[in-house]
């Protein structure tokens, strides 16, 4: 398998344009990745990349070999998938990530069931509301709410999630009830912000009669944990923009009240992203199918 592994490393270096990123993606050290690339070049007797201290640029031979390498990887994975499907015994470790709300409600509860079906597969689940770079952190699949920006990854849509602007009755009794997004800004309502590196929650995308529009909301409280924002809202500290499934019980109990219903938040997609299918193995696809079905059932 060493030659195949060398080809896999080459493909990821080509696609990511970075030795360290490719090494993380394949869960080896940069030194091992560099060594495997050198072995492949020696075997082929060509230089696949022009190397500088700052970049890797594929040579003409590298570009030609990349096209053939994709076919090799795809053929191997199709063969492995067929065998694994017939045998029904996938094995290995899956590193998955999800936002806190999605992970706690829809992913974590079903991990034991997946493990019972596939006892030779171990799941490592990371939950965080911060933006996660799955390539840099070696994640196999990340579930999320919204739209990803990285076009090099494959996305699978699972379900549409309604979002709600809401606040506690105590807050509304003091600050008043905003009817729309314009009132949120004009009356300087305290909006509880989800903030982390790369976050855009300081702008809320709301539906207006003229179509979706971004509103520059603000407030004195922010956190990188969505559940903390919910706790603050329940304590009367401001208005939150949350998926309905996260605060439905609080709405039913009257602890939170919908606001700005004339301009509701644009629904988010619950989806997952993962590296190209060419570089996936059967257990990853099984896990995605399993969790997608349960997430969709839980939301609908």
Image (cartoon, rainbow, N blue to C red):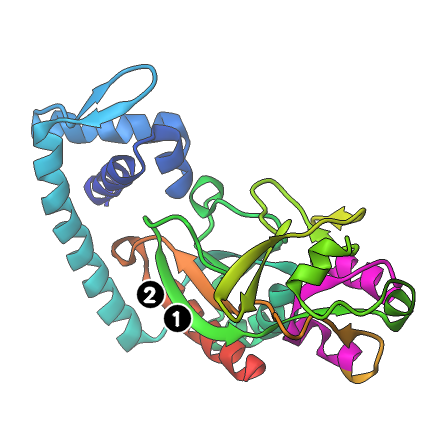
Q: Which mark is residue 286?
A: 1
Residue 97: percent from left, percent from top: 54, 56
The disc at residue 73 is none
Residue 158 is left or right of residue 109, and the answer is left
Q: What is the chief secondary structure element of the magenta stretch?
A: helix
Circle 1 crowding by C-alpha within 10 Å: few under 14, some 14–19, many from 20 = some
The residue at which mark 2 appears reads as 282
Task: Please tell me how crowded label 2 is: few (under 14), some (14-19), or many (20+) other residues with Cα within 10 Å.
Answer: many
Q: Is residue 217 magenta?
A: no
Residue 42 in the image, given as x and y percentages of width and height:
14, 25
Q: Nearer the viewer, residue 120 or 283?
A: 283
Q: How many marks?
A: 2
Name the element at disc 1: helix
Q: Is residue 245 magenta?
A: yes
Seen from the viewer's position, the closer of residues 199 and 36 is: 199
x, y percentage for residue 53? 33, 14
Q: Is residue 4 above or below residue 93?
A: above
Q: Quadrant of residue 228?
A: bottom right
Going 16% across and 49% down the picture, which residue do you hit? 70
What range is drawn magenta here? 227-251
| Label 1 close to label 2 by CB (< 8 Å) | yes
For residue 45, which quarter of the picture? top left
């Amino acid at each position: 398998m060493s030659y195949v592994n060398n080809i896999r490393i080459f493909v990821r270096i080509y696609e990511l344009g970075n030795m360290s990123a490719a090494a993380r993606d394949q869960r080896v050290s940069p030194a091992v990745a560099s060594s495997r690339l050198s072995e492949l070049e020696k075997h082929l007797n060509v230089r696949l990349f022009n190397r500088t201290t700052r970049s890797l640029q594929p040579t003409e031979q590298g570009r030609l070999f990349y096209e053939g390498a994709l076919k090799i990887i795809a053929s191997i994975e199709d063969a492995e998938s067929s065998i694994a499907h017939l045998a029904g015994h996938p094995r290995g470790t899956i590193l998955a990530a999800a936002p806190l709300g999605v992970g706690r409600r829809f992913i974590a509860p079903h991990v034991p069931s997946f493990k019972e079906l596939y006892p030779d597969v171990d799941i490592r689940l990371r939950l965080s509301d911060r933006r996660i770079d799955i390539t840099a952190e070696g994640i196999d699949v990340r579930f999320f709410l919204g739209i990803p920006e990285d076009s090099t990854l494959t996305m699978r849509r699972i379900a549409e999630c309604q979002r709600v602007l809401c606040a506690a009755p105590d807050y509304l009794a003091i600050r008043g009830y905003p009817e729309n997004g314009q009132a949120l800004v004009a009356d300087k309502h305290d909006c509880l912000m989800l903030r982390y590196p790369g976050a855009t929650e300081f702008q809320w995308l709301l539906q207006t009669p003229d179509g979706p529009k971004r509103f520059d909301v603000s407030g004195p409280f922010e956190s990188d944990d969505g559940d903390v924002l919910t706790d603050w809202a329940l304590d009367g500290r401001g208005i939150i923009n949350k998926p309905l499934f996260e605060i439905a019980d609080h709405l039913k109990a009257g602890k939170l009240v919908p606001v700005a219903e004339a301009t509701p938040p644009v629904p988010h997609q619950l989806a997952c992203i993962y590296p190209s299918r060419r570089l996936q193995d059967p257990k990853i696809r099984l896990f995605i199918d399993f969790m997608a079905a349960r997430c969709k059932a839980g939301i609908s």
